[in-house]
Image: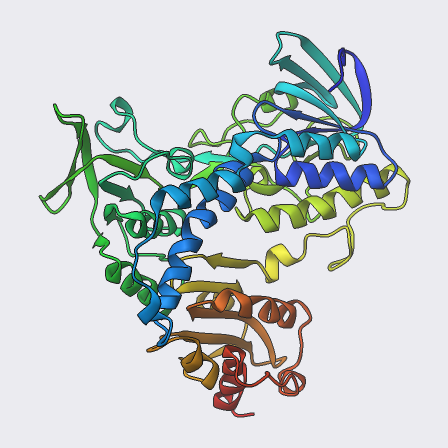
């Protein structure tokens, strides 16, 4: 912490000390520049305390137990259900009990300064901070200001929602008790994961989605996840609108649905998407105005440089969820590494204009190879383009898909069910995308990511022999079905 940073100058000022902000700061300091992080909440951000880490900590015990229950020889030894208290305690450990001491120590040890407060831009390269201790700070950036402010939940237009206190992902992942009845609004990744986590912890869960479950993924893959949720007792109300929500006299919630039915729940989790957290940052002061729908959105180049900012030179950047491209922690950290390196290179005169694709300064993978995992049981893992996206982007594509039925999957668990797909550029004979669904398929994903990023020709990929007996043998079966 710095006592009086008012009027202080740094090479780089980073607003937001989550995973993306930390990575930018680390890269610019390693590049020889000075950096200060400004954070109003916990250093480490959403992923560390209210998203990735606690949600996966809630999910993993149920997946491990289910894995044992589906393996002969192990299932006979499993006689108990999950211990909810122990699961919540383990979750607390992974969030460091919502304290950021270790993260603050890392910032200090890395040569990065920290100011705790709410930041807003007042002019190009100038950031005002309303300190949490009541002190006002003025920070000047010699080279760059980076927005790494993350994202916030998007509230759907449901009658009565504004008048009741519901859960967002924060309340769900930090819950100290398991509700008897939980309603989840939204069939995306977070809603689906948390629905299963709480169902396995003992909640009677109803998931309500205006469209289908995990609609951005192939139907075959999403269908396996839906079957897994139903097997855990989750009541799926898909293609069903939520029209109203209200409180009953006993403190429970009543949810009116578009089909005329209603759901009663002790807690309601609203998980209907997120949008960049850009409000209150003073963007209007540097010429960035809301669009016709009142939304603040940023247009960035391959280094994260914001295109519309007033002022001379390259100075305003956005990374992670704030940039609004890919709302994944791992992708935000990737963007941050490229942006940090680009800022340091420009400061030294080593980068003029835009960088080459796939260089250390460019976020090229954002356009070609974004990996993502839905950590349900079964898992869903995907990277690159879907076949629909590839066709829209003008590629001459084909796809090959099949159930995952190899020696490794049959050994993994009894009645293993999985599905896999490759999306192939027929002109260059390389992979454009891949999807896997099934228990523990997340560990197949990095091989697919490497194949897509490296544009490995299929005839060469044929020589990547999967070890036997592993689930990775599905790669061989896919290539065989393609004709190799």
Q: Nearer the viewer, residue 471 or 275?
A: 471
| Quadrant of the snapshot with the N terminus | top right
* Quarter of the image where one finds residue 457: bottom right
Residue found 67% across the figure and 77% down from its top: 456
Residue found 44% across the figure and 40% down from its top: 89
Residue 458, given in percent of the width and then of the height, sits at 62, 83
As drawn, is 475 to the left or to the right of 201? Answer: right
* Quarter of the image where one finds residue 37: top right
| Scheme of colours in the image | rainbow
Q: Is residue 207 above or below residue 418?
A: above
| Quadrant of the snapshot with the C terminus | bottom right
Residue 209, given in percent of the width and then of the height, sits at 27, 49
As drawn, is 333 to the left or to the right of 384? Answer: right
Q: Report if residue 134 is visible in the image.
A: yes
Residue found 29% across the figure and 26% down from its top: 165
As drawn, is 209 to the left or to the right of 307? Answer: left
């Amino acid at each position: 912490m710095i006592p009086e940073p008012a009027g202080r100058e740094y090479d780089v000022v980073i607003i937001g000390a989550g995973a993306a902000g930390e990575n930018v700061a680390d890269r610019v300091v390693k590049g020889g520049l000075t950096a200060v992080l400004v954070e109003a909440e916990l250093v480490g951000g959403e992923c560390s305390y209210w998203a990735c880490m606690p949600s996966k900590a809630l999910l993993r015990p149920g997946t491990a137990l289910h894995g044992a229950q589906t393996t002969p020889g192990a299932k006979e030894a499993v006689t108990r259900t999950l211990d909810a208290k122990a699961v919540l305690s383990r979750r607390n450990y992974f969030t460091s009990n919502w304290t950021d001491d270790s993260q603050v120590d890392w910032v200090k040890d890395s040569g990065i300064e920290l100011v705790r407060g709410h930041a807003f831009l007042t002019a190009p390269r100038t950031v005002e901070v309303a300190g949490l201790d009541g002190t006002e700070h003025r920070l000047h950036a010699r080279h760059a200001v980076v927005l790494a402010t993350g994202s916030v939940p998007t509230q759907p237009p449901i009658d009565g929602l504004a008048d009741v206190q519901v859960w967002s992902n924060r309340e769900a992942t930090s819950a100290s008790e398991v509700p008897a009845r939980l309603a989840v609004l939204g069939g995306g990744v977070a809603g689906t994961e948390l629905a299963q986590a709480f169902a396995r912890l003992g909640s009677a869960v109803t998931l309500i989605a205006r469209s289908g479950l995990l609609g951005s993924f192939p139907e075959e893959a999403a269908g396996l996840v839906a079957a897994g949720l139903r097997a855990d007792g989750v009541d799926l109300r898909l293609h069903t609108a939520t029209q109203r929500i209200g409180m009953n006299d006993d403190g429970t919630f009543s949810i009116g649905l578009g089909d005329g039915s209603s759901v009663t729940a002790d807690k309601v989790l609203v998980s209907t998407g997120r949008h960049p957290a850009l409000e209150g940052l003073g963007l209007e002061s540097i010429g960035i105005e809301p669009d016709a729908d009142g939304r603040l959105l940023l247009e960035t180049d391959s280094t994260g440089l914001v295109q519309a900012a007033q002022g001379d030179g390259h100075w305003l950047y956005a990374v992670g969820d704030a940039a609004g491209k890919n709302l994944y922690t791992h992708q935000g950290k990737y963007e941050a590494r490229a942006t940090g390196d680009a800022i340091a290179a420009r400061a030294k005169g080593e980068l003029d204009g835009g960088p080459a694709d796939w260089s250390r300064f460019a976020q090229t993978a954002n356009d070609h190879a974004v990996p993502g995992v839905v950590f349900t049981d079964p898992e869903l893992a995907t990277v690159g383009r879907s076949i629909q996206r590839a066709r829209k982007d003008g590629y001459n594509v084909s796809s090959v898909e099949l159930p995952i039925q190899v020696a490794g999957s049959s050994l993994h668990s009894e009645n293993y069910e999985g599905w896999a797909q490759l999306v192939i550029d027929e002109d260059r004979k390389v992979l454009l995308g891949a999807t896997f669904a099934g228990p523990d398929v997340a560990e197949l994903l990095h091989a697919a990511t490497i194949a897509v990023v490296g544009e490995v020709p299929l005839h060469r990929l044929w020589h990547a022999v999967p070890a036997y007996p592993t689930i990775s043998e599905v790669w061989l079966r896919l290539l065989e079905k393609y004709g190799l």
